[in-house]
Image (tube, rainbow, N blue to C red):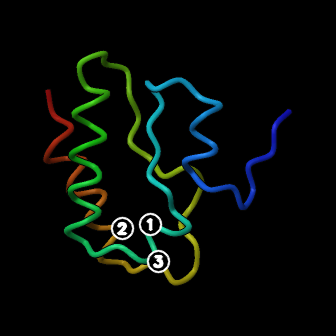
Amino acid sequence: MRHYRRTKSEKTRENFPSSCPFVDQVEFMRKATPNEVREKVRDLLSKVKPRGNWILSTTDFFFDGTPYENIQALADAGREFGEY
């Protein structure tokens, strides 16, 4: 069993296939602007949509201090860019 607590998402990604993209909820979701969240989701979905069977999610849960606008931007971008 591998533990990823407090691991940078880039390091964690080395242990998962490229078909498993991440939205880092610790640093990125707390510090990004809503537009940066939207662009991150658009980029991730452009990579996973061609193969199908994807789930848009953060790598874990939303931490205290995550701006509600960023959570909304994640959901809105998922609806906008996630449709086939």
- Nearer mark to the viewer, of 2 and 1: 1
Give SS at disc 2: helix
Q: Residues within 10 Å of mark 3 (few under 14, many from 20)?
A: some
Q: Residues within 10 Å of mark 2 (few under 14, many from 20)?
A: some
Disc 2 marks a residue whose amino acid type is Ile
Which of the numbered marks, if any, corresponds to residue 66? Answer: 3
The spot of residue 61 in percent (x, y) is: 57, 60
| Residue pointed to by mark 2 | 71
Disc 3 marks a residue whose amino acid type is Thr
In which quadrant will I find the N terminus? Answer: top right
Give SS at disc 3: loop
| Residue pointed to by mark 1 | 28
Disc 1 marks a residue whose amino acid type is Phe
The spot of residue 64 in percent (x, y) is: 57, 80
Q: Are the two marked residues, 1 and 3, in contact with CB atoms closer than 8 angstroms?
A: no
Residue drawn 29% across the image and 56% down it: 75
Residue drawn 53% across the image and 67% down it: 62
N-terminal-most mark, 3 or 2: 3
Marks 2 and 1, Cα distance to the nearest angstrom?
Answer: 11 Å
- Nearer mark to the viewer, of 1 and 3: 1
Residue drawn 25% across the image and 65% down it: 36
Residue drawn 44% across the image and 37% down it: 21
Marks 1 and 3, Cα distance to the nearest angstrom?
Answer: 9 Å
